[in-house]
Image (cartoon, grey):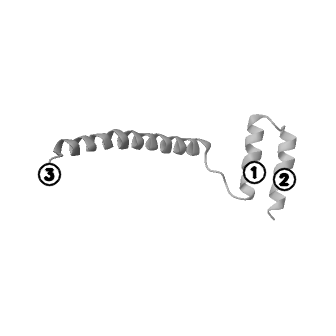
Amino acid sequence: MMGGGMMDGMTALVWLWVVVPLTVLALVVAASVWLVRTARGPVPPGAAAARHELDLRYARGEVDRDEYLRRRADLEGSRR
């Protein structure tokens, strides 16, 4: 007797109840990671990263104009 047709259907249903929520959870996590990375924006490499950070600090008001110009000149001088 081969039977078990109903059990095979129930097994498939149980797998759906496990696989579908895990897939949705994985998609939500992946979307969250993508969103955080794109919201932050690209980080420039090397000396450009330091200049980018200085620009951000100036925009936030953490350094005044004179300090910003002095540090920017230092960074531009270090590339030569």
Distance between the Cα atoms at labels 3 and 2? 82 Å
Name the residue tied to disc 3. Answer: 2
Q: Residue at x 72, y 48 (%)?
A: 52
Asked if the residue at tag 2 contacts the one at tag 3, i.e. Cβ–Cβ closer than 8 Å, the answer is: no
User: Which element is circle 1 on?
Assistant: helix
Using residue 24 as the reference point, say whether residue 33 is left or right of it: right
Q: Residue at x 49, y 45 (%)?
A: 30
Instruction: Using the image, determine if residue 43 lies above or below residue 16.
Output: below
User: Which element is circle 2 on?
Assistant: helix
Name the residue tied to disc 1. Answer: 51
Name the residue tied to disc 2. Answer: 73
Look at label 3 and name its amino acid. Answer: Met
- Depth check: 80 or 34 in front? 34
Tell me where residue 79 appears, x and y as whole percent.
Answer: 79, 62
| Quadrant housing the C terminus | bottom right
Q: Residue at x 24, y 40 (%)?
A: 10
User: Which element is circle 3 on?
Assistant: loop
Q: Residue at x 78, y 34 (%)?
A: 61
Which mark lies nearer to you, 1 or 2? Answer: 1
Distance between the Cα atoms at labels 3 and 1? 72 Å
Tell me where residue 24 appears, x and y as whole percent.
Answer: 41, 40
Q: Which mark is residue 37?
A: none
Distance between the Cα atoms at labels 1 and 2? 10 Å
Choose the circle earlier in sequence order: 1 or 2: 1
Asked if the residue at tag 2 contacts the one at tag 1, i.e. Cβ–Cβ closer than 8 Å, the answer is: no
Look at label 1 and name its amino acid. Answer: Arg
Using residue 39 as the reference point, say whether residue 16 is left or right of it: left
Q: Residue furthest left?
A: 1
